[in-house]
Image (cartoon, grey):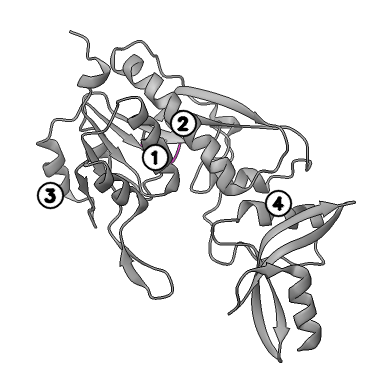
Amino acid sequence: MQETKSEIKIAFWGTSRISVIVLEEMAREGMLPSLIVTAPPRQKGRGLEMSPSEVKVWADAHNVPALEPEKLDSEFCFQLSTLDFGLFVIASYGKIVPRNILDLPKHGTLNVHPSLLPKLRGASPIQSAILEEVPVGEPHDAGVTIMLIDEEVDHGPIVAQQKITVPNWPPKGTDLEEMLGILGGKLLVETIPLWVSGKITPEEQEHDHATFTKKMTSGSGQIYLDDDSARMFRKIRAFDSWPRAYFTTTRNNLEIRVVVTEAHLEDGKLVLDRVIPEGKKEMSYEDFMRGQRGS
């Protein structure tokens, strides 16, 4: 007897905003997971208060049980093994899931990855795509891949893939994340019934064409106003959420960090529009410079 969409028992693994976007698409199509696995609470904000992940907040709002394991150890593996899942889905979980856990469900573990694999494997495909040296203002392709996870990072065979063309590159990081999260969620919902019924044969990636992304850090967003304008503009776009693009300057003989929130290119030159100076609220760049001249 074939499993129908409503009969598939799914555990969803995710932590970040794009995970929530994928979950929204699953919920919209009546494919709520039976369990969500997400990262435990972390310190956030200026007060460093312990806060749950965005996915845990979503799970609570939709009455979906959620687990927040610190370790994916043998005890946790045994706990999952007793729940008899048909499929695991991973979308931006943030940790490497051990092989003994990946192999638990009958239909394996699928991963939603926001790039056209084998391009842009690794932890930062969205930001890395925006940072690529693509002509500003021209159309450029992006997309998502659903793959069967194996032992290597983003290396497993492709189950489904879909491409979109962004007409005016580069988009902001959060906008591209939204686009690819929705695209990935819709593709996932279409793919799961076909996958579990054996109607999809996964295809090996073209590993010789693989490219890899770097893990971004809090310092990745630093820009230099006398550097290449297009490259700095891409950084401002890529890091509009985290770690935020910024430059340093001096105010009252002290070095400060100035976050750039809006900018554009004009005649090939970078023009800053909105900034957040350290210790201040967001303001126009003109107002910031006026204050600098008066300090």
Which mark is first along the chain, 2 or 3?
3
Residue at mark 4: 234
Q: Nearer the viewer, residue 112 or 29?
A: 29
Q: Is disc 2 placed on a helix, strand or loop?
A: helix
Q: CA distance from mark 4 to mark 2?
A: 24 Å
Which quadrant of the figure contains the N terminus? top left
Quadrant in which residue 255 is drawn: bottom right
The residues colored magenta run 151-155
Query: x and y percent of residue 177 in the render?
Result: 53, 42
What is the number of the mark on residue 91?
1
Disc 4: CA contacts within 10 A as few (<14), some (14-19) or many (>=20): many
Which amino acid type corresponds to the residue marked 2 in the rendered image? Answer: Gly
Whether residue 114 is visible here, answered yes or no, is no
Q: Is disc 1 placed on a helix, strand or loop?
A: loop
Picture residue at 56% right of the left edge, 40% below the top: 120
Query: x and y percent of residue 32 in the render?
Result: 27, 31
Residue at mark 2: 184
Disc 3: CA contacts within 10 A as few (<14), some (14-19) or many (>=20): few
Q: CA distance from mark 1 to mark 2?
A: 9 Å
From the viewer's perspective, is residue 158 above or below residue 268?
Answer: above
Which amino acid type corresponds to the residue marked 1 in the rendered image? Answer: Ala
What is the number of the mark on residue 75?
3
The extreme bottom residue here reads 253
Q: Nearer the viewer, residue 243 or 216?
A: 243
The extreme right residue here reads 267
Disc 1: CA contacts within 10 A as few (<14), some (14-19) or many (>=20): many
Which mark is first along the chain, 2 or 4?
2
Which amino acid type corresponds to the residue marked 3 in the rendered image? Answer: Glu
